[in-house]
Amino acid sequence: MSDIPSSDPLRPKTGPDDKPPYGESFFVGGFLGLSGHNWSWIAVRGVFALLLGIAALFAPGFTLFAFALVFAAFSFVDGIAMLITGFRRPNTHSGRWWALILSGLAGVAVGVLFIVWPLATTFAYALLTVMLIIGWALLTGVLEIAASMQLRKEVKGEWLMALSGVFSVLLGLALLWLVFANPAITILSVAWLIALYAFMSGITLLVLAFKLRKHANSNQ
C-alpha cells in the first residue's frame, strides 16, 4: 500500500509495508464498498419511487386492484434492491446491514401479499391494501433509519437515508390517522399522499446514490 499523506485527517498514517490498521480498513472497505457496489441499487430504489409517484398521480384512472398491483410491484422491487444492498455490504467488522436486509424482506413480503389476497371482498380488500401499506411504511421506515445509523459509521450523507426513512414513517402515520378518521378509505382515495411520499423519497434516494457515486469515482 502506498504512503497516505498525513494531511488527510480521515486516514491514519501507514508505512509502505504496513498493513492498514482497523480504522483505515474499516473506512476504505466500508466507504468504497458502499459507494462502488451499492450506489446503483439505491438509485434503482429512487427511480422506482418516482415511477410510483407518477403512477399515483394517475390513480383515478386505475381500478383498485390495478393500483394495488402497481404498489405491489414497487414494494417488491424496492425490497429486492434493499436486500441486494444489505447483502453486498463489504465484509468488514461491522457485519452486514441487517436493518436493510429485514427491510427488504418486509418489502418483498408485502408485494407478495398484495397479490395473494385479491379474492377478499371488495371492502375487505380495500381496507387490507391500506393496512398493508401502513405496516410496510412504518416497518421499512424504522429499519431504514436504523440502517442509516450503521451507515453513519462509514460515510457522510447518512442523513439522506434517514430522511427517506422518516418520509416512510410519516406516510404510515398519516395513513393510520386517515383510517381511523374514515375506515372506508382505499389506496385510490389516498393516492395523492402516496404520490407525495414517493416523489420526496425518490428524490432523496437519488441524491444519496449520486453522492455515493461521486465519492466512489473520486477515490478510484
Image (spheres, rainbow, N blue to C red):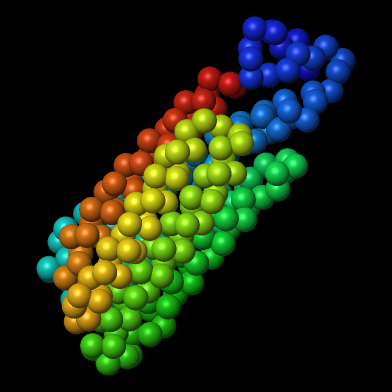
x and y percentages locating residue 48 in the rendered image? 35, 53
- Identify whether 30 is placed above or below 178: above
Q: In which quarter of the image is the C terminus?
A: top right
The furthest residue to the right: 17
Q: Residue 47 vs residue 86: left or right?
A: left
Q: In which quarter of the image is the N terminus?
A: top right
- Identify whether 145 is placed above or below 131: above
Q: Which residue occupies 28% across, 81% down? A: 127
- Nearest the viewer among 171 and 58 is 171
- Nearest the viewer among 191 and 71 is 191
Looking at the rendered structure, the number of numbered marks drawn on it comes to 0
x and y percentages locating residue 160 in the rendered image? 42, 39
Q: Residue 15 vs residue 198: left or right?
A: right
- Identify whether 187 is placed above or below 26: below
Is residue 187 visible in the rendered structure shown here? no
Is residue 193 visible in the rendered structure shown here? yes
Q: Which residue occupies 31% across, 60% down? A: 171
x and y percentages locating residue 151 in the rendered image? 57, 40
x and y percentages locating residue 201 in the rendered image? 34, 48
- The image quarter containing residue 75 is bottom left
Q: Which residue occupies 55% across, 44% down? A: 149
- Nearest the viewer among 148 and 16 is 148
Q: Which residue occupies 29% across, 84% down? A: 125
Q: Residue 87 vs residue 216: left or right?
A: right
